[in-house]
Image (cartoon, helix red, strand yellow):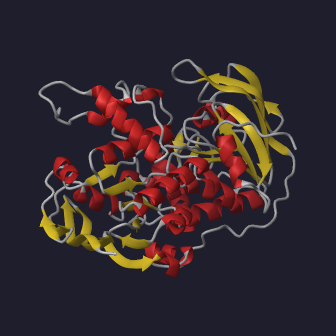
Amino acid sequence: MSVLLQMQDITKQFPGVLANDKVNFEVEKGEVHTLLGENGAGKSTLMNILYGLYQPTSGTIKLRGQKVEITSPKVAIDLGIGMVHQHFMLIPALTVVENVILGIKPERGSVLDLEGAAEKIVALGKKYNMNIDPWAKVWQLSVGQQQRLEIIKALYRGADLLILDEPTAVLTPQEVEELFVIMRQLTSEGHTVIFISHKLNEVMTISNRVTVLRAGRSVATVNTKDTNKEELARLMVGRDVFLRMDKKPCIPKEPVLQMEEVECLNNKGLKALKKLSLEVRAGEVLAIAGVDGNGQSELVDTITGLRKVTGGRILLNGKDVTNKAPREILEEKVAHIPEDRHKRGLVMNFSIKENIMLMNYYKEPYSKGIILDWNYIEDHSEELVQQFNVKCPNIEVKVKNLSGGNQQKVILGREIDREPRLLIAMHPTRGLDIGAMEYVHKRIIEERDRGAAVLLVSTELEEVLSLSDRIAVLYEGEIMGIVENNENVNIEELGLMMAGSKRLAS
């Protein structure tokens, strides 16, 4: 293979942040080359430089042996570089064909040839098995179809080097496999793909080579066939990482949470949960799997009293808590790790110690009557910071100044310290690096082994398979099926349920 791209000594300095530090990155024509690293390692910054969204502070880029200056995305497109961003750059109100030709000058005068463009889109779709109606509005497309549209848009504009930024984050397992088929076909025809990811299973499946970034620096480039997930994780983090939880068999006891035909509305007034029934037992982890936006947020909101139930009922420890106030529900020994730690988990301008006391400030030993016991609060906060390995100068520091992983540990410490009977963990590792993920997983399993019932909500199938004892798949507010997580668990069946197929009773 010949070298297509060379990025040499690329440095990008933002105010107070060195995002890329003399990064070297080389891609060969016709390969799938993964750019791997923890959150904040500098992957997206490097690719935004290649696509012309950022300008490097220093360093050079060579494409096909020639030095280039990519001053804008238009320059990148003209050089044959296309990028599919993690958050799609599409206009929902426009049609597929209108999105594809947006910004392209008409070939004949001032008249847009929509019919001709639609024919080209259909031809590209057939060639790569990405059939999309060119006249459909983007808002009518599924997430997987929108991603294919982004790829078609890049190919339509002549891209032969395609950057895919975390492309599998919002896809079902079947859609991931379909994407990989498309990627293999593209590279077999001479296209080159740069694949940004942190999912090691996918990296090993699809890549020819992997470049690992850590703390803004390129630490290694390896052939995928000569490495393994453990080595890649070690390169990402700088130490050995346990990728799968080694947990004892589950010994479930009495039901702690019971939901009986629960219904509720979403923020638009539409039905979000439809006669949903499930139970979580003491000593088990029940995971809710599914693509984001299928009722997960509403499910957790109804349990924690943050959203009104319009039908059915919710029992905690055998007691009906349907539509009770959040504090009443939390007093039933419920702990909640929310999906958005900034909006619902922490008060960002408060210190660590102030955030730790938020759940219990109104009762002993945190207060005596209306007087806060600051000596106890400070001593206990110091204990939790040590116990949960929160890296911080002191407990007086504002949580907004902590990293995402340490913010999550503050929430984890506060909630687990309450010794809950029910622990609700929603996307507990979202935005965390692999080292912090490992720690959070360990603490969740410790709670399950202590006898708590754990309701885990995650869109990461690897996380679901690693932590859960049972898996319930949620699709458009309905449970498609519940399966035991054992050696016989069928990933394909889970994927079909995530796409809306109900499980046949066994």
Q: Tell whether 110 sits left or right of 179.
A: left
Q: Quadrant of the N terminus?
A: bottom left
Residue in front for this viewpoint, 42 or 130: 130
Residue at coordinates 30% horizontally, 33% vertically from top-left? 117
**Which quadrant of the view contains residue 288?**
top right
- Residue 346 visible in rendering: no
Residue 152 appears in the picture as rendered: yes
Quarter of the figure with residue 347: top left
Residue 346 lies, with reference to residue 432, above or below; the image says above
User: Residue at the bottom extreme?
Assistant: 226
Q: Position of residue 476 (x, y in %)?
A: 63, 31
Where in the figure is residue 464, as x and y percent of width and height? 65, 54
How far across and down, in percent of the image, does residue 313 sit? 76, 26
Q: Is residue 47 above or below residue 334?
A: below
Q: Residue at x 65, y 42 (%)?
A: 498
Left/right placement of residue 243 relative to residue 340 reads: right
> For the point 54% across and 55% down, which residue is it?
429
Between 408 and 382, the one lying in front of the other is 408
Which residue is at the front of the view, 130 or 203?
130
Quadrant of the image for the C terminus? top right
Picture coordinates of residue 274 (x, y %)?
70, 25
- Residue drawn at x 47%, y 42% is 130
Picture layout, residue 232 above or below residue 154:
below
- Number of callouts in the render? 0
Residue 312, placed above or below residue 457: above
Looking at the image, residue 467 sits to the left or right of residue 353; the answer is right
